[in-house]
Structure formats: C-alpha cells, structure tokens
Amino acid sequence: MATVKDSLVIANPLPSGDGYTWTLASRLGEMILDIEAQFGKRDPSWTILGIEFCDSGPRTWFPGDCEHIIIQLDLSAKEDPVQALFQLAHESVHLLDPVVFGFGTVLEEGLATYFSLQYIKQFHPNYTTSDTKYAAAARLTAQLLYINPMAIKELRSRGIKISQITASQLLAVCPKLPKSIALDLVTPFHNWIE
C-alpha cells in the first residue's frame, strides 16, 4: 500500500525560522481566504474537521450529521501533490455553503472547478480536468464571472446560498448573461445534460 507523500502532511521548519513548509492544511487555509475574497464568507456554522484520503473521493463528508465537514481526497492523490491540491481546491469551494452530494447545482460544481483550475496554475500551468461535465460547468461559470466577477459574492452577501441561486437572481446581477446559461447554471448538477 502506497503511503502519503510527506510534503502533503508534514510541516518542516523553514530555514529562516519564520514558519513552516506548506501542507494540505495550510494550503486549505490559503484557499479559504482566496475563496472568501472572491465569493464571500463561508457559512461559519459548519466546523471544518480536516482533510483525509478515501477510495471514493474527492468529496465532502458530513460525519455525525451535526454540521461537521471533512474534505476527502481520492487515494490516488496521496502521492501526487498537484492532484491533491487540485482536488482540495475544488472541495474547498463546497465549504462556502455545504450541501449534501446530489443537491449541488451546475453553478456550484462549475465554481468549484473554475476555482481549482485557477488555483492549480501556480503549480502546473497546463493542468486540466478530464471530466467533460465538470469542465463544461466551469466554462459556463467562467462566462458569468467574466461578465460580473462579483456576481456570486453579491448574491451570497444577501444570504442566498449558492445551491439556491435562481436564474432570475443571476440575471438581475448579470443582465448581459444569456438566459440559457443562467438556466443551465441553476440546474441540479446530477440531472444536467451538457
């Protein structure tokens, strides 16, 4: 059985004595700050318990049904720092307004994929996702954000959760967005046919 790459979980002191090397945990903190700056503050009623690897990841998991959340990365990422960071960046977006698997919209999965693709460029400039459905959702989300980069943050500042954003709300903050894209973005992701 392969072990987890040390750099993902072991923090070593920096030679300068001013801090430690990056791990998944410290990268998650960086990601949350970036996501909140772009898309608004996360729902603080959820307690983030940490990051783990499992054979059915990546995903978020809600142990005990008590507003606790864990990010689970796929076992295949435990020896591949770029894949681990890509998966972590994607799942970190789901910390904003956590929803149980199957209840997210194209917008939520598109936003997560869009962010993860942007984040991973600093480590692997040409990294892409091979999942065409997630890539298509990211492209639609990118069109929204191109027209109005503050659309998600603006709607969330009104107390609207990402998975509950409607097409009319999207069009209100982004009137130049084609109605067909707005309708696609609010479709439940698991029902969406790209």
Image: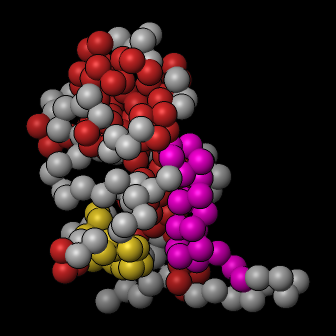
Say how many tags the image has. 0
**What residue is shown at x 44% (from left), y 21% (from top)?**
173
Q: Main secondary structure of the magenta part?
A: helix
Where is 129 relative to 73, above or below? above
Farthest residue, direction front:
158
Residue 31 is one of the magenta-drawn residues:
yes
- Colouring of the image: secondary structure
State the image coordinates of residue 11 (x, y, percent, origin top left).
63, 86
Does residue 49 sit above or below 184 in this rendering? below
Q: Residue at x 45, y 76 (%)?
A: 79
Q: Is residue 22 left or right of residue 174?
A: right
Q: Nearer the viewer, residue 50 or 5?
A: 50
Specify start and end residues of the magenta stretch as a single range. 20-40
Q: Residue at x 52, y 23 (%)?
A: 148
Q: Nearer the viewer, residue 124 or 171?
A: 171
Measuring 44% from the left and 18% from the top, which residue is drawn there? Answer: 174
Res. 38 image quadrant:
top right
Name the quadrant containing residue 152.
top left
Residue at the farthest right position: 16
Q: Position of residue 177 (x, y in %)?
A: 40, 14
Left or right: 144 with respect to 192? right
Viewer-side residue, 27 vs 38: 38
Task: Please state, as top left, top right, bottom left or bottom right, where the C terminus lies in the image.
Answer: top left
Q: Is residue 66 magenta?
A: no
| For residue 64, above or below residue 117 | below
Depth check: 167 or 193 in front? 167
Q: Quick check: can you spot residue 174?
A: yes
Query: Based on the displayed image, in which of its 4 quarters is residue 70 positioned?
Result: bottom left
